[in-house]
Amino acid sequence: MADSNLAPEKSFVFDFVERNADAVATIGDSVFYFGELGMQEVESAGLMTETLEKEGFKVERGISGFPTGFCASYGSGEPVIALHTEYDANPNNSQASGKTEKRDITPYGPGHCEGHNCNAAVMVSGAIAAKRAMDEFGLKGTLKVFGAPGEEQLISRPYYVRDGWFDDVDVAIHDHIGGDMSTVYGLTHSAAVSAYFTFRGETAHASTAPWRARDALDGVVLMDMGMAQFREHMEPTMRAHRVIKDGGDQPNTIPAKATVWWTFRAPTAEGARVVFEQGKKIAEGAAMMSNTEVEVVVMSAVWPVRTNQGLAEVIQGNLESVGVPEWTEEEQAFAKDLQDAADVTTDGLKTEVKPLLGPTEQRAPSNDCGDVSWKVPMGRVGFPSNVPNVPFHHWAGGAALATSIAHKGSVAGAKTLAGTIVDLLSQPDLVERAKSTFAEEIGEVVYKPLIPEGQRPPVDLNREMMEQFRPSMREHYVKNKPEFI
Ligand SMILES: [Zn+2]
């Protein structure tokens, strides 16, 4: 529970978020039902920017060539505090909220099965609460609120960093859904490079004259075999995985074009680059063996994510002031039923804030906020809008995302985020501590983007899939708009 010795600015933002719990929920639910895939988050970005603009933020849309990216700013001077998060869904992850069994909203359609819809609600609401406190208490500084498209494909934020959007930023805060109220410091995620490998050959009739063909699909298959051999010699912390995007059209025509999309991961940016370089050699070998040519187009390239100790301490203080939401018996029962259905530990919803126990362990997944985290000190607010233990990108990961659990968790997240911003605006020594711990953390490492020079965002990614499903998804859109009072 919130303690009674809070600074007036802190009580103000906590009360503001509490009073606007409906608006917080409306943003989260709206983005949930938009269910938009990376790079096609038109409705989601539209709602977020419209809401911030109405509140007096100056919105720049389409930044760094991302139609669904934005920067909304408020205030002036130092410190400059950046907030950033993602709001994309995943393919084939449509899941009805509030059900403890797999049930599509739109059959085979995209949907939120991790909770980036709540990330959006927390960032926008937390930013508005902090802005209101700036007005009320004359707090000086600048808020820059970044919408980051295509996190699931690890795309946007390296471009923002490359293009200078973080050059004047003092500290940055990312918010992400989870099963508990927590923050961390240390290296959390891995670096990754992903690329399309397109093999090109020549068609022929597969039964009458197969000897005339140069089979592009053979290139894809041989690369797969080469990568399988290479896996034995990768370090245990490295990963390589792929999907075939285009394997030809019909069996009686040997394909002249075939594309495989590979992701290579490693704990360091240099490690990811090394695995990628070996992948390219294997692709060249596969092209040679299949008498085809191969073209490599980088889709994403991100640094590992690290979070800063100084900011983690500020966030932890706020998590503890806010406290875990009070869950009802029904919410606990739903959580346990869902955990049971997902075949994970059935310990229900967390009732305590996770303690900050020292540096975290680095894990294999990636997030495109990694590049931000090597440019400026970055903290992460983890908020409890999902059921603990449920797997992400699985129907169970989507089942709670527009329920009262998601709503209460987002309120707790927005309060924590706003409280953290208010602390940073009113106590310059906290920003200094973030910077000094950051300098120690990165040591001699010099950040240099992994994305190739001149690289442009893949703006057409997921367009066709979204166009196919959007008309039927539209029937489920939330009708009302968030109103902050
Ligand atoms: Zn995520």
Image (spheres, rainbow, N blue to C red):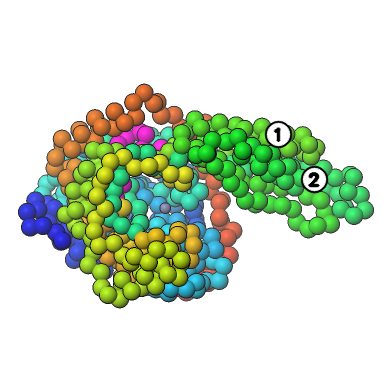
Residue 193's spot in the image, x, y percent? 53, 39
Q: Are marks 1 and 2 in contact (CB under 8 Å)?
A: no
Q: Determine which of the numbered discs, if any, sits on residue 332 in the image.
A: none
Q: Quadrant of residue 370?
A: top left
Q: Nearer the viewer, residue 307 or 40?
A: 307
Count the marks: 2
- Quarter of the rendering occupied by the N terminus: bottom left
Which amino acid is tagged 2?
Answer: Asp
What's drawn in magenta, residue-wise? 370-381
325 lies left or right of 282: left
253 lies left or right of 221: right
Q: Residue at x 31, y 59 (%)?
A: 384
Q: Which residue is mark 2?
A: 215
66 lies left or right of 382: right
Q: Residue at x 36, y 64 (%)?
A: 387
- Is 374 one of the magenta-colored residues? yes
Which amino acid is tagged 1?
Answer: Glu
Q: Quadrant of residue 99?
A: bottom left
- Quarter of the rendering occupied by the C terminus: bottom left
- Is 112 one of the magenta-colored residues? no
Q: Residue at x 38, y 42 (%)?
A: 361
Q: Residues within 10 Å of mark 2 (few under 14, many from 20)?
A: many
User: Which residue of the protein is positioned furthest toward the left in this rendering?
Assistant: 5
Q: Is residue 84 visible?
A: yes
Residue 45's spot in the image, x, y percent? 40, 56
Q: Residue at x 67, y 39 (%)?
A: 229
Q: Is residue 399 visible?
A: no
Q: Determine which of the numbered discs, if any, sits on residue 284 in the image.
A: 1
User: Which residue of the protein is positioned furthest toward the top in this rendering?
Assistant: 444
